[in-house]
């Protein structure tokens, strides 16, 4: 399975949400902010920046679910701007400090929101490839969790979430 399949799934979900919620305006900035929030929630679950605490990170499946929440918004933002030519998962096998990686990712997201170019969009994907590697997630992990969360998102829409 490649990213094109995920883009297709995301397009169908986005269309369903827009119809269900009667969205008739550009929600690019809202989705950009949502991605920022999801990145923060992911960082929070890793606890990588919490030098003051002795508590460890959340369970792997909790961290993976937060990671995948971000993937939904990255795909959705790409769909809004027509940046969907990415075929392959960005594999970046480089050990990096998580705090630095989160900060770098945040910078690229902010840059993309203010100047939505294909290069700034691709940089976000690269950051998420780097995060996946440093969190120990494979493409198969991400796809499996994405599919599961995608169905949950449909169920939430059907139940008035």
Image (tube, rainbow, N blue to C red):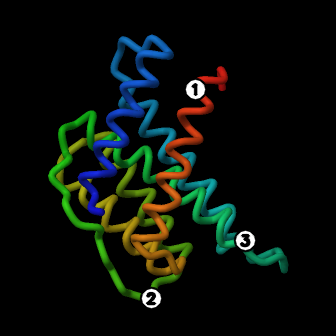
Mark 1 closeness class: few <14, some 14–19, many ≥20 residues within 10 Å: some
Give the spatial CA distance, label 1 vs label 3.
27 Å
Front in this rendered view, residue 75 or 94: 75
Residue 3 to residue 80: above or below? below
x and y percent of residue 158 in the render? 59, 23
x and y percent of residue 108 in the render? 35, 57
Mark 3 closeness class: few <14, some 14–19, many ≥20 residues within 10 Å: few
Residue 11 to residue 45: above or below? above
Badge number at residue 157: 1
x and y percent of residue 129 in the render? 37, 70
Q: Nearer the viewer, mark 2 or mark 1?
A: 1
Front in this rendered view, residue 115 or 39: 39
x and y percent of residue 101 in the render? 46, 72
At 44% across and 88% down in the image, what residue appears?
A: 95
Element type where label 1 sits in the image: helix
Badge number at residue 59: 3
At 62% across and 31% down in the image, what residue appears?
A: 156
The quarter of the displayed image where residue 138 is located: bottom left
Element type where label 2 sits in the image: loop
Earlier residue among tags 1 and 3 = 3
At 49% across and 16% down in the image, what residue appears?
A: 20
Badge number at residue 95: 2
């Amino acid at each position: 399975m490649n990213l094109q399949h995920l883009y297709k799934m995301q397009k169908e979900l986005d269309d369903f949400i827009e119809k269900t919620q009667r969205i008739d305006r550009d929600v690019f900035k809202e989705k950009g902010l949502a991605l920022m929030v999801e990145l923060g929630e992911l960082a929070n679950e890793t606890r990588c920046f919490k030098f003051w605490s002795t508590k460890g990170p959340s369970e792997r499946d909790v961290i993976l679910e937060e990671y995948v929440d971000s993937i939904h918004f990255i795909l959705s933002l790409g769909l809004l701007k027509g940046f969907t030519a990415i075929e392959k998962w960005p594999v970046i096998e480089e050990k990096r400090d998580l705090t630095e990686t989160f900060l770098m990712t945040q910078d690229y997201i902010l840059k993309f929101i203010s100047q939505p170019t294909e290069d700034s969009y691709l940089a976000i994907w690269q950051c998420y490839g780097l995060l996946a590697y440093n969190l120990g997630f494979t493409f198969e992990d991400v796809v499996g969790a994405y599919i599961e969360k995608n169905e949950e998102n449909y169920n939430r829409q059907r139940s008035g979430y």
